[in-house]
Image (cartoon, rainbow, N blue to C red):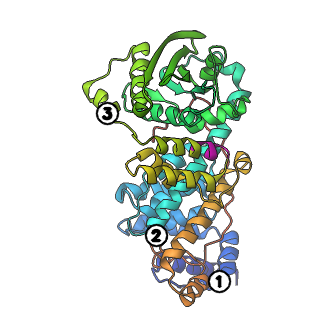
Amino acid sequence: MYLKKSINIILLVTISLLSGCGGGGVSTKAELRRETENNVEAIPYNSGYLAATPDSDKSPSKLGFWYLKTGRVDEAIAEFKTALKKEPGDPFLIYYLGLAYLNKDDFEKAIHVWKSYRNKTHPQVEEEIERHLTLIHIARSRKFAAQAIADEKKLATVKPDKNTVAVCYYQDLSPDRSLRAFQKGLAAMVISDLTKIKSIRVVERIRLQALLEEMKLGQTGFVNARTAPRLGRLLGAQNIVFGNLALGSIKATTTLASSDKGDVIGSASVSVDKDKFFELPMAIVRETADIIGVVLTDEEKKAIGVPHTKAYNALVYFGQALDALDAGKWKEANEFFNMAHKEDPGFDLAKEGMDTCPGADSPSLNSLSGTSGARLSAKIEAAVSAAGGSQAVVNKSAAEALSVSGYTGADVVGVDVGAMGITGVGDLTVTPETSGPAPPGNLTFTPN
């Protein structure tokens, strides 16, 4: 009796995974969950099948998906990475590999993987993932900031990266505070231009913002010669750019401090007429490179010489959008990004902000601070399924049919899960293995 039951279970799971028939084998999610939780021996059986049939195109996709949905996250990652070697750029594999990394609390690798997600047939899904990448960036940065403060004594003994630069917000010294929009907008443009210099690594603005908040400097965002070295040590950056803005045309004074030396190593000032405001970022970048001792190539000079926008109002709206984004006011931020882009459709930073700004119903900033990767993964999967469903489901009867099959976002990531023979798995609970967040100062990720 026991043997017969085991054989039936194995056949049931095998048909579900390998038949390629949309509804084969399992009629309800509850049945599949029950069989999965009590009979995980079916997975090694299928592993043996895959070893015997290595040319089965979607087999690693199936098994990886199954591993992820049953909590075997490391094995899921291995399967997805193996499959990606055969199918580079496959949206199904990239999407679920990112979810798998999130379930391990590995935000860095999830971000790296999802940066390459492209899906021309389901643009709504691609847009949804871009918006959630911003949330992951914020969540990761807040975890990093809290850990950096906790490890401050230890970090004080670590020599910062000499080629890394952090750009802080310029303080508005104008009597009427009319240059407020320049504070974050100017910093964002300088950061963008510095990334065009190959020998320099630049700290992300979102990471800087998270640390400023952790240091209780979030409301003003301003640093000075006294606080800059500490900020640099916490960020793992040797060079800290900060400064101020004043009227009399527009005058920007830039100061560069060294976290290693604990002091200011150089400063420079530049003044431009208001209608030439767009010249400020390129001038600041050239000054920063000169103080650090970096010789710009002709190609780099040309790249940083292209204005981000010549529309003053576009910059004002862009700065207001960044303020709203940092405050977790997602709807307001999106509106300002749209206004900036409308003022200047060629303003790439505004377009990027518009495309990646979290939706109005996204988790709040406070909830992001304590959200685990697994919980964030579940929220993202639900949102992506909804985005795919809105594009794929064209009438009520189709939506009901998908719901009965157990997967409400059929083909939402570029592969029809039903056609893969995987049904009824839309809400299986993942119990991941845990791992700590990336250590402070880990600014980049190099894949295996």
| Disc with the residue nearer the chain's start (3 vs 2) | 2
In this rendering, the label closer to the viewer, 1 or 3 = 3
Amino acid at circle 1:
Thr
Q: Which mark is residue 239?
A: none
Q: Residue furthest left?
A: 298
Q: Which image quarter is the N terminus in?
A: bottom right
Which span of residues is magenta-colored? 322-327
Residue 17 visible in the current orientation: no
Amino acid at circle 2:
Tyr
Looking at the picture, tell me which residue is in the foreground, 84 or 285: 285
Image quadrant in which you'd find residue 171: top right
Residue 325 location, x and y as percent? 61, 46
Residue 326 visible in the current orientation: yes
When the figure is inspected, residue 15 is found, relative to residue 384, above or below; the finding is below
Badge 2 vs badge 1, beta-carbon distance below 8 Å: no
When the figure is inspected, residue 43 is found, relative to residue 445, above or below; the finding is below
Residue indicated by mark 1 = 28
Distance between mark 3 and mark 2 Cα atoms: 53 Å
Residue indicated by mark 2 = 49
Amino acid at circle 3:
Ala
Looking at the picture, tell me which residue is in the foreground, 172 or 378: 172
Residue drawn at (56%, 49%), measured in percent from left and top? 134
- Dot 3 falls on a residue whose secondary structure is helix
Residue indicated by mark 3 = 303
Distance between mark 1 and mark 3 Cα atoms: 57 Å
Q: Residue furthest bottom?
A: 397
